[in-house]
Image (spheres, helix red, strand yellow):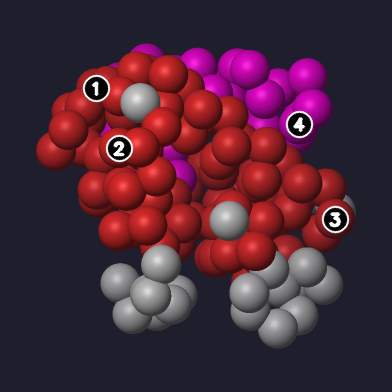
């Protein structure tokens, strides 16, 4: 689902700015749906852990400093993605989102995580959030 959503916009892979915007939209939707369940600090901690776990596959991502707001985390991610080659940015966006969702799923279960992702992403398009 993540791969499909990352590339649903025409030309997404060819344009790093469009790809970065699409990745950020996905993250914003996940944050909106998950923070009521796990809290802002829980989201920040899991995001930092996912970034750490994704680092071997995505060395272009900046380290996360404790206490950064979710908006600042996403701004940094957007800038990091824009700096990467388009194919690498797509792959890294995919790796990071999958790693994060796997971490959350291990805590709340597959069924609830799938339900949250469907609520966050299915039937919505970028720009209509």
How far apart marks 2 and 4 lie (CA) works out to 28 Å
How far apart marks 3 and 2 lie (CA) works out to 31 Å
Q: Earlier in the sequence, mark 2 or mark 4?
A: 4
Is 85 or 125 nearer to us in this picture?
125
Q: Nearer the viewer, mark 3 or mark 2?
A: 2
For disc 3, the marked residue is 87
Q: Nearer the viewer, mark 2 or mark 4?
A: 2
How far apart marks 2 and 1 lie (CA) works out to 20 Å
For disc 2, the marked residue is 112
- Residue 54 on the magenta segment: yes
Q: Which mark is residue 41?
A: 1
Q: Earlier in the sequence, mark 3 or mark 2?
A: 3
Q: Earlier in the sequence, mark 2 or mark 1?
A: 1
The image quadrant where one finds the N terminus is bottom right
Q: Quadrant of residue 18?
A: bottom right
Question: Looking at the image, which residue is at 43% across and 37% down?
Answer: 73
Residue 70 image position (x, y, % from top left): 33, 39
Within-10-Å neighbours for mark 3: few <14, some 14–19, many 20+: some
Q: Which mark is residue 58?
A: 4
Asked if residue 28 shows in the view, the reply is: no
Q: Is residue 29 above or below residue 91?
A: below
Identify the magenta region. Answer: 46-74
Secondary structure of the residue carrying numbered label 3: helix
Is 58 or 109 nearer to us in this picture?
109
Q: Are marks 4 and 3 in contact (CB under 8 Å)?
A: no
Within-10-Å neighbours for mark 4: few <14, some 14–19, many 20+: many
Secondary structure of the residue carrying numbered label 2: helix
Secondary structure of the residue carrying numbered label 4: loop
């Amino acid at each position: 689902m993540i791969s499909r959503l990352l590339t649903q916009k025409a030309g997404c892979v060819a344009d790093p700015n469009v790809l970065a915007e699409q990745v950020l939209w996905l993250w914003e939707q996940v944050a909106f749906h998950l923070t009521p369940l796990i809290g802002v600090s829980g989201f920040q901690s899991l995001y930092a852990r996912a970034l750490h776990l994704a680092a071997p596959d995505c060395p272009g991502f900046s380290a996360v400093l404790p206490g950064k707001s979710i908006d600042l985390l996403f701004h940094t991610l957007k800038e990091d993605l824009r700096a990467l080659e388009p194919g690498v940015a797509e792959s890294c966006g995919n790796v990071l989102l999958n790693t994060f969702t796997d971490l959350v799923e291990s805590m709340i279960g597959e069924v609830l995580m799938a339900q949250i992702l469907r609520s966050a992403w299915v039937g919505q398009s970028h720009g209509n959030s």
